[in-house]
Amino acid sequence: MLLIGERINVITKVQREAMKNRDPKPIQEMAVKQVKAGANMLDINIGPAEDDGPELMDWIVKTIQEVAQVPLCLDTTNLAAIKAGLKAHNNQWGRAVINSTSGETVRLNTFMPVAAEFQCDIIGLCLSGSGLPADANDRCAIAVDIMTKADEVGLPLDHIYLDPLVLMLNGNQEHAQHCIHAVEMFQTLNDPPMKSVVGLSNIANTAPASMKGILTAVFFQMLRDAGLTAAIIDTLEKDFMEVVQTRNPKMVYRSDHVEKTERVIRGEIMYAHSFLEV
């Protein structure tokens, strides 16, 4: 399982200020902490970075790889910044990843050729211009479009991580099971099976803080049982990392709470913020 640390992100005040001021210390400290906690890749989210994207991405990639000898996942919509990051990236520690393209025509035509040019990896988000995919079958249809474009531009399929598009459980309950089924189906689209990745924390958006841990841990284990190969996560969450190591949420959370959470994710019980209390 590839664990991608999510903590170097422009939305975090400390990291945003460090990026703005080109202060390496907070960024390097966070990189080292995540790797020590178990991350074997780091996501670097600099936002749109419209004014100084290429220079910022070049600086931050070099800054991180001075202290953390892992590959990096470059997270921005700024194409010039992506290219600058790929040029700066030290591939001695593994291929960089572009985060991300999707099934939308403009994004496919923009980012997939760059992945082919640099022969790096790329995340393919199962989202199209038609809106949210209805179910696992729709996600797989978009995945095929992504794979077709990769073949067209000369990017090997083993450079692609398919992302089934995790939505928050609150208000989108049926999509949790669709994501699990999509991960299962992705493996049938190619031989060897296609790789998959999720932005795990999305599942617990808007949930009370007391529930976020069990929601992400149980959903993660269900996805891993379905064949998930990578996840963008917070490796500094000790309870979650224990679940990663033991492969058993019941080692951390009450057995009845785990079982009830599984039933909610499968759609057998209606989600509410209080579902564990009922």
Image: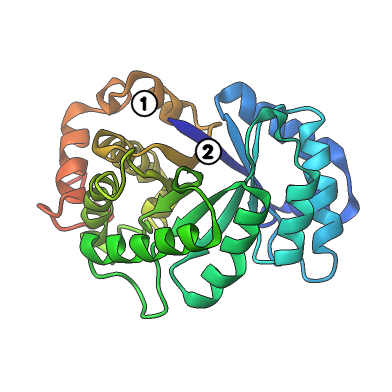
Q: Mark 1 points at which residue?
A: 243
Residue 189, disc: none
* Location of residue 200 in the rendering, given as x and y in whole percent from the top left corner: 42, 47
Tell me the SS state at disc 2.
loop
Residue 234, disc: 2
Q: Which residue is drawn at 54% across and 55% down?
A: 154
- The structure's colour scheme is rainbow
Alpha-carbon neighbours of circle 2 within 10 Å: few (<14), some, or many (≥20)?
Answer: many
Disc 1 marks which amino acid?
A: Val
Q: Distance between the residues labelled 2 and 1?
A: 13 Å
Q: Residue 241 vs residue 85: left or right?
A: left
Q: Residue 265 vs residue 87: left or right?
A: left
* Location of residue 174 in the rendering, given as x and y in whole percent from the top left corner: 21, 61
Quadrant containing the N terminus in the rendered view: top left
Above or below, 39 against 208 in this view is above
Residue nearest the viewer, comparing 209 with 143: 143
Q: Which residue is drawn at 40% across and 73% down?
A: 128
